[in-house]
Image (cartoon, coloured by chain):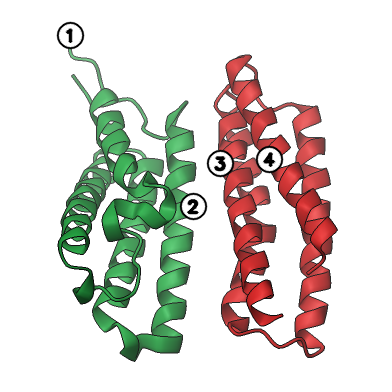
Amino acid sequence: MIDALEILVLVATGALAVFGVVLTILNRPPDRTMRLAVGAVEVLLVVQAAIAAVRVFSGTALPETQTFLIYLVVSVCVLPIATQFATAEPTRWGGTVIAVGAIATAVAVWRLQGLWLAGA
Amino acid sequence: MPEPARATSSGPGRVLIAVYGVFALSATARALVQIATKFHEAPLAFLLSLVAGIVYILATIGLNGRGPGARRLAWAAVGFELAGVLIVGTLTVLDAADFPDDTVWSVYGRGYGFVPLVLPFIGLWWLRHTRAR
């Protein structure tokens, strides 16, 4: 994977988690700014997943390809689902729901990097 | 006048469901990969991982649902989860040899930041907090 992009993704998901918790503390439901932030992070995740997938299918050997691909799918899917669930009931808790999704995504990216390094 | 039960899927309950959903996904997916790729290495641990994953799925469905049926499901699943993490956690602390590969409940969920140990307590508290009274 690309180290710079991975670090950017981890920072972005971390910032998103903080943003979500701040919204909860401020007693505000997820707003348009939050949707844009989620969208921006999601773009990064999709780019990262696309690059990694192309490399895997063009011959980069990994010890656990299956697991890697599952984590790759998880890294892209969790945030949209969490955001959908967070905004279905517009309360202050929506921000924390997005934060949970962002942290889970960060963990998945972290595991991806570990699996990738194991193959390098 | 008795107060009816409140929805477990409202307000902070949604955060709880999100955490349960993440664990349902990760524990089940991990167990399925382990069973598909290296079942013979530690069949007991991998089956236990799968049971844990299913329990998290049922808890997520129960907490997210409405009505007495969903609430009963949530009670049963979260109760089972608490028993599971305490029993498996204690067994793995006493004798690591019987569990050669990690499960989500090994050593009280150490591999997952001990969230698996804390989660059922919060789940049971939330079910009690929102019950009819």
Image quarter hosting the N terminus of chain A: bottom right
To the question of a shared chain for discs 3 and 2, the answer is: no
Badge number at residue A14: 4
Q: Outermost residue, top direction?
A: B1
Q: Secondary structure at mark 4?
A: helix
**Rendered shade, chain A:** red
Which amino acid type is marked by label 3? Val
The reply to whether the C-beta atoms of the residues labelled 3 and 2 are less than 8 Å apart is yes
Measured as percent of width and height from the top left, residue B14 is found at 47, 35
CA separation in Å, label 1 and label 3: 38 Å
Would you name the residue on which mark 1 appears?
B1
Q: Which mark is residue B22?
A: 2
Q: How far across and how far down the image is residue A61, in percent? A: 71, 88
Asked if residue A9 is positioned above or below residue A55 in the image, the reply reads: above
Where, by quadrant of the figure, is residue A88 drawn? top right
Q: Chain of mark 4?
A: A
The chain containing the residue under callout 1 comes to: B
